[in-house]
Amino acid sequence: MKKPKITVYIPSHNYGSYLREAIESVLRQTIDNWELFLINVASLDNTKDIMESYKGDLRIKVCHTKNAGLSQAANFVLKRSRGEYIIRLDADDVFDENILLVLGNYLDRFSDVALVFPDYFLVDDHGGIIRYEGKQSIYHTNHLLDMPANGACTMIRKKVMKAVGGYREDLGAQDGFDLWTKVLRQHKCANVNIPLFYYRRHGENLTEDHVRILNARRAIKKDACAVNLDKHRPIVAVIPCRKHYDIYPDLWRKELNKKSLLEITMETCLSSAIFDKIIVTSDNAAVQKSMSKYRDGRLLFIERNKESTTYSCSVVHTLEHINRTLGLKWGGTSVLSYVQAPFISAQTLEEALYTLILNSADSAFAVREVEEDLYKRSSHGLVPITPQVRMKSDFDVVYATVPSSSAIRNSNLKTGSLTGARISHFIIPQEETFFIRTKRDYEIAKILKGKTLMQAPLTRR
């Protein structure tokens, strides 16, 4: 039997209702030089029976596993595949008949490219097209490579996958981001702006498992940045406070469950080992009394000019003053943490830094994706800002900043810029986006903080 050029594999865990359509989309390919692995991942539905019905095709290998996850299945195939290129198809998605032809030819032609991925159609549970989803051409129109390819339907050279150690098996999610991060450090990647698969959105998608995805994403970023972390030191956490101009004078004094907002914020920063210094800056020296409760040499007070605390004054001026006082000479990185964000976690503060480093950005901000339709006023009434078409690019996504966490290169401050030219982003958990702007917000925060403490013993690991 002729050696295949491309290895396709389809893992399925209880996706029998979609599986046959996925398999048939491989059989319809316009080229024949492929092999297909069907991996039954401990399914309790009819997955096994469907896979067994294809055993007569010599190009297809059927495997049954009891306790393997998605990454384990991928590494299983990596060891046994004969193809030069590998691509995964999820059991609930469908290939376009030309995907192997197009992506395979791309890797044949461009020997310096390690992986290539296409655009796709987003479809509903019944296969109806919701919209076209695409990414701008990387290296040409998209230069900040912070939007990874999908784990599925991305074709990669097997030798590259082996060289980077295959897939991590300790994450349980974000395998595509893991692979993208490892490959991008050493190789060139590419995308083609042709929709070559159908991605099905339904309630059982792994992408709905937010906690698992969040934890996996953060672990990948942390590990990817570990080698280069010292190049970005000193890493300084900055907690800005002020006496006036908030909903209450000295808002930092206000308490949630017998701890002041400043104490909550300091404890969050102190729980992270990545910070070399933790600076509380205020125009009221009384904050030092709260600071004296903590015996950590990293915690320092730097007085803040009253003029720099007004709403019309950028926090850049405060950061410049801190930079000069510490003698940093515009080196290192600052991570901002606000007392008005009492639910922010140390992991989110760290992710701000890791996002900046991973993407070689000048700054990284916490954001939320705006899914509502937005409009602006024109001479003839309202016109939409967000796209109203059935074709969506990654450049069409609209984000709103969440003033909870951000990381800044101190070199930006030399020119009076907070963000710099290259701005990256990361999405944080919904509960951490809460920010106290009004007295009502503060009253809500007291209720939420009480519920958080009551639930803590139940969620402790």
Image (spheres, grey):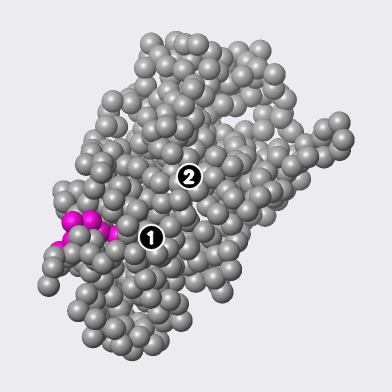
Q: Which portion, as a residue range, is magenta?
A: 82-87
| Residue at image coords 67%, 40% | 436
Considering the numbered disc 1 on the image, is that residue within a helix, a strand or a loop? loop
Q: Which mark is residue 98?
A: 1
Can you see residue 60?
yes
Horizontal relation, residue 164 to residue 440: left or right: left
As drawn, which residue projects farthest toward the right?
380
| Residue at image coords 40%, 79% | 20
Query: Of the residues shown, which amino acid type is indicated by label 1?
Result: Asn
Determine which quarter of the picture holds residue 297: top left
Q: Earlier in the sequence, mark 2 or mark 1?
A: 1
Neighbourhood count class around disc 2 (C-alpha, 10 Å): few under 14, some 14–19, many 20 upward: many
Identify the image quadrant of the N terminus.
bottom left
Can you see residue 278?
no
Query: Of the residues shown, which amino acid type is indicated by label 2?
Result: Lys
| Position in image of residue 365 (x %, y %) | 52, 35
| Position in image of residue 359 (x %, y %) | 38, 34
Determine which quarter of the picture holds residue 377: top right
Residue position marked by numbered label 2 in the rendering: 135
Looking at the image, which is closer to me, 39 or 276? Answer: 39
Q: Please, is residue 255 above or below residue 331 in the view?
A: below
Horizontal relation, residue 340 to residue 80: left or right: right
The magenta stretch spans residue 423: no
Looking at the image, which is closer to me, 267 or 82? Answer: 82
Q: CA distance from mark 2 to mark 1?
A: 19 Å
As drawn, which residue projects farthest toward the front?
30
| Position in image of residue 113 (x %, y %) | 26, 42
